[in-house]
Amino acid sequence: MTVVTAKTPYFIAKIMSGDMFYLHKSCSYGEGWNVWDKLNSKTRVKGSLYIRNPVEGNEVLKKVINGLLFGTAGIPLSTPKPATSVNGVLRVRELGLNAMELEFVRGVKMSDDLAYKVRSVSEAAKVVLTAHAPYYINLNSPEKAKVEASINRILETARVAYKAGGWSIVFHPAYYGKDSAELVYERVKEALKVIVRTLSDEGVSVWIRPETSGGLAEFGSLEEVVRLSQEVEGVLPCIDFAHMHARSRGEYNSYEEFMKVFNYVEKELGKDILKNMHMHFSGIEYGEKGEIRHLNIQESDFKYVDLAKALKDYSIEGIIISESPNIEDDALLLKKAYDLS
Ligand SMILES: [Zn+2]
């Protein structure tokens, strides 16, 4: 009997090609997921993939992303009125992009009915959804109530994203305040364990991804989010290239440095992570304390052609989201550079 300790869809896939697995009835949903291609030539299932772990009885949903999908942070600016999530998904499709991040940055506001509608529209349009949790999160707050509220905001984001058929959620975990990095790490880790356990009990399965942060006061170095991913099951990093560039005040902005990042995550998290990446990018202005504001790529120093080439050369798969002010223009700019490299 196989114990599922999977970190990525591909690892799960390997387990599933054995005989101890069950598929959830909702496997028939959608058309975007041809998950069995790589697994078993005789069995083809389209739809969201659920795996019941026969040992632990947990249900794990992992969508497999094939290739690298480019998307927008929120609905494209050029979405026709009314600017709804549904119209945003359709506009993403029209633009030739394949992903969209639902921005719950000012609060998780989406009814169940709307979430289900977004799910069916996005599946039909073959647009993969992710979600960004509210900014107002600090898992290291000295006030217990604020930590609880932060945990709840992440839980709510995951629940709604899951209903909307989402694949992965991102959030900014914490501020260091006056505490040591190690103490903050332990607090964030404990909170993430609670989050993952709660969602697992509820059958909500989306990747939980702490994001690399842009400000020096914010928890979230590459090493910290990678270590969380090693130590908490169900957690993987969201690599925000603009933030890493700002946080390091100028590093992470060349082909060699981007390749080094991919090499590092591969070394620390295993090869499968390269097929399961959630990334952000944009231009960025930064100062002594790190991030000041996001910029359009062409008004910034961001070497996006280098990133495109590194993504291609390392055969990175997953989702990369544009967080530039001009959202879709830069998503298309990076996609074009990628296609040409
Ligand atoms: Zn973010």
Image (cartoon, grey):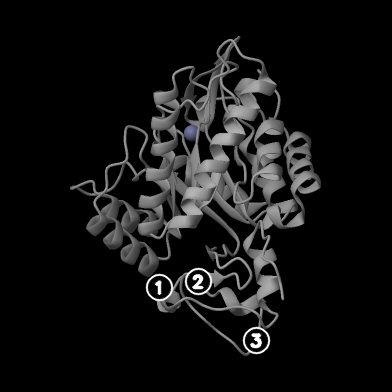
Closer to the chain start, of discs 3 and 2, is: 2
Q: Is residue 306 above or below residue 110?
A: above
| Quadrant location of the N terminus in the rendered image | bottom right
Which image quadrant for residue 7?
bottom right
Q: Tell me the CA gap for discs 3 and 1.
A: 20 Å
Identify the residue at image location x=41%, y=56%: 162
Disc 3/disc 2 C-alpha distance (Å):
15 Å
Q: Which residue is mark 3?
A: 41
Given residues 113 and 193, the one toward you in this image is: 193
Which residue carries the number 1 mark? 30
Task: Bin the neighbour count of mark 3 within 10 Å (Cα to Cα): few under 14, some 14-19, many 20 and up.
Answer: few
Circle 2: residue type:
Trp
Callout 3, which amino acid?
Ser
Figure quadrant of residue 95: bottom left
Q: Quadrant of residue 265?
A: top right
- Say if 34 sits above or below 133 in the image: below
> Camera-side residue: 282 or 206?
206
